[in-house]
Amino acid sequence: MKRQSGNSAGMGGMKLNNLVGILIGISAGILVACGLCALITTVGIITRIAWRTKTVDRITIYENSMILGAVTAVFVYLSMPDFYINDVISAIILAITGLFTGVFVGCLAMSLTEALDASAILFRRIKFTGDTRYVLIAAALGKFVGNLVYFR
């Protein structure tokens, strides 16, 4: 009876470990991308953009594009070591990515600003007569202290 070498059995196990690692990595990336999409939807960026551009009838296209972009970003990020083409094309890709990232951050800031406007409306409705900036500073300090305690 011939004995098999330890390498052949080890290679199959190693391939299985790599496959499981790849599946876990892709699944975690897609989960994070979906969480980001949920956050963006909760904050209301998509609806505000559609409302401001008067394209509310195309909101499904906005949402599908956001999900497609997030999932595509997962796969692009996973293939980054092999993504380099040459200096010029990489610079163009970097510029386009920077532009879209800047637009995203601007839209997020706009949505958060409008959310602060909503808190002003709430203060008016509950007939809050104090200075609202102290309430907002207290909320920010509370978040700061909470993060210090939680991540300590």
Image (cartoon, grey):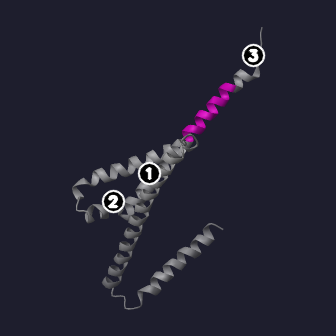
Of the 4 image quadrants, the one containing the N terminus is: top right
Looking at the image, is 31 positioned above or below residue 10? below
Task: Identify the residue position indicated by label 3 in the image.
Answer: 4
Q: From the viewer's perspective, is 115 left or right of 9?
A: left
Residue 78 falls within the magenta-colored stretch:
no
Q: Which residues make up the magenta segment?
A: 11-24
Residue 46 bears which disc, if any?
2
Residue 144 percent across, percent down from the top left? 56, 75
Of discs 2 and 1, which sits in the foreground?
A: 2
15 falls in the magenta region: yes
In this picture, is 22 found above or below 63? Answer: above
**Where is 99 relative to 71, above or below?**
below
Report the front residue among 110 and 119: 110
In the structure shown, which secondary structural element does the residue marked by tag 1 occupy?
helix
Of the residues shown, which amino acid type is indicated by label 3?
Gln
Q: Which residue in the structure is indicated by mark 1?
A: 34
